[in-house]
């Protein structure tokens, strides 16, 4: 459940980051919150799997972890790209 809260915070902060950049305001705090929440989401997912291993719930591990692993990789990469996009776009604008 905690991973869902952190995940939602990460998504909202990422959209705020992009919005702040588009309207020309300081976006760096939203970017930091988005990336930090992404990291906390990953840690809470790891904690969930760790609990399953402790209680030897191998069916949960076997059913959920393979799909979850692909989703976490994808969503983490998307989060990094979207949160860093304003910095990269700003740098590109300065070079032009």
Image (cartoon, rainbow, N blue to C red):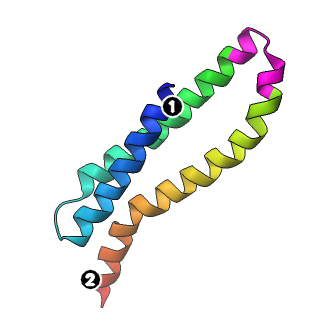
Q: Is residue 1 above or below residue 84?
A: above
Q: Residue at x 55, y 50 (%)?
A: 76
Is 76 situated left or right of 54 in this image? left
Residue 60 appears left or right of 33:
right
Sort mark 1 into few (<14), some (14-19) or many (20+) by Cα contacts within 10 Å.
some
Image location (x, y in percent) of residue 43: 54, 30
Question: Residue 9: image x %, image y %?
Answer: 38, 41
User: To which residue does mark 1 refer?
Assistant: 3
Secondary structure of the magenta portion, mostly?
helix
Q: Quadrant of residue 19?
A: bottom left
Please say if 70 is above or below 25: above
Q: Which residue is mark 2?
A: 94
Q: In this rendering, is residue 76 above or below 88?
A: above
Q: CA distance from mark 2 to mark 1?
A: 37 Å
Q: Classify mark 2: helix, strand or loop.
A: helix
Front position among marks 2 and 1 = 1
Q: Secondary structure under badge 1?
A: helix
Q: Residue at x 74, y 33 (%)?
A: 64
The location of residue 66, given as percent across then percent down, is 78, 39
- The span shown in magenta is 52-61
Residue drawn at point x = 19 percent, y = 70 percent: 23
Displayed quadrant of residue 83: bottom left
Residue 17: x, y in percent?
A: 30, 58
- Please tell me which of labels 2 and 1 falls first in the chain: 1
Q: Quadrant of the C terminus?
A: bottom left
Q: Count all numbered tags in the image, as a single digit.
A: 2
- Classify residue 43 as left or right of residue 36: right
Q: Is residue 57 magenta?
A: yes
Residue farthest along the top direction in this orientation: 55
The residue carrying pointer 2 sits among few (fewer than 14), some (14 to 19) or many (20 or more) residues within 10 Å by Cα, namely few
């Amino acid at each position: 459940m905690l991973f869902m809260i952190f995940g939602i915070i990460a998504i909202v902060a990422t959209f705020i980051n992009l919005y702040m950049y588009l309207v020309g305001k300081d976006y760096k705090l939203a970017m930091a919150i988005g990336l930090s929440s992404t990291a906390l989401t990953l840690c809470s997912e790891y904690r969930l799997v760790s609990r399953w291993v402790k209680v030897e719930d191998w069916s949960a591990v076997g059913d959920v972890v393979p799909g979850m692993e692909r989703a976490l990789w994808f969503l983490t990469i998307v989060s990094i790209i979207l949160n860093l996009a304003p910095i990269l776009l700003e740098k590109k604008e300065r070079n032009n």
